Amino acid sequence: MAFNGTWKVDRNENYEKFMEQMGVNMMKRKLGAHDNLKITIQQDGNKFVVKESSNFRTIDIEFTLGVNFEYSLADGTELTGSWNMEGNKLVGAFTRKDNGKALTAHREIVGDELVQTYIYEGVEAKRIFKR
């Protein structure tokens, strides 16, 4: 599948502003903007295994398209939600457990890059990864 492989963050767009909107403190925002995130994605039909490795943590996430699961962000924010496929794009709809607000995420392949877009409370950010 197109998402399969290991992807390393190359650049961010509006990521610090997004983290600020999420309520991440300034120190964690500065660290998070330079976390050297690497994502390894393995897709088998509707099942995904994603390994996220950064300067702060390594976590394995397993999910099936359309099935709710729980996930915590690097700053400790807990979410519940699911990923679905819309065309060639993975679309995630998540709800924060602490305040019930929605976080949307998209993953899509654009050229030779994986573009991950986050939207929270009207603030959009992108993290662009290369293989």
Image (cartoon, rainbow, N blue to C red):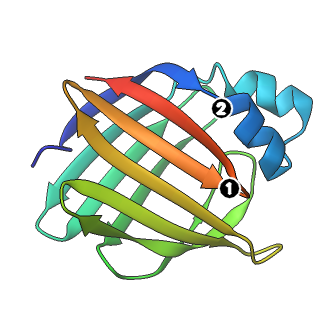
Q: Which is nearer the eye, 99 or 110? A: 110
Tell me the residue that label 2 is attached to: 15
Q: Residues within 10 Å of mark 2 (few under 14, many from 20)?
A: many
Q: From the image, which quarter does the C terminus lie in?
A: top left
Looking at the picture, how far across and down is residue 51, in whole percent?
39, 45
| Callout 2 secondary element | helix
- From the viewer's perspective, is residue 29 above or below residue 62? above
Q: Which is nearer the eye, 23 or 13? A: 13
The residue located at (9%, 49%) in the rendering is 1
From the viewer's perspective, tell me whether residue 128 is left or right of residue 43. right
The mark nearer the N terminus, 2 or 1, is: 2
| Callout 1 secondary element | strand
The residue located at (36%, 48%) in the rendering is 107
Question: Which residue is most to the bottom?
Answer: 67
The type of residue carrying mark 2 is Tyr
Looking at the picture, how far across and down is residue 90, in whole percent?
31, 58
Distance CA(mark 2)–CA(mark 1): 11 Å
From the viewer's perspective, tell me whether residue 88 is left or right of residue 9. left
Looking at the picture, how far across and down is residue 39, in whole percent?
38, 37
The circle on residue 34 is: none
- From the viewer's perspective, is residue 36 above or below residue 122? above
The circle on residue 120 is: 1
The type of residue carrying mark 1 is Tyr
From the viewer's perspective, tell me whether residue 25 is left or right of residue 107. right
Q: Are marks 2 and 1 in contact (CB under 8 Å)?
A: no
Q: Residues within 10 Å of mark 1 (few under 14, many from 20)?
A: some
Looking at the picture, how far across and down is residue 50, in whole percent?
35, 51
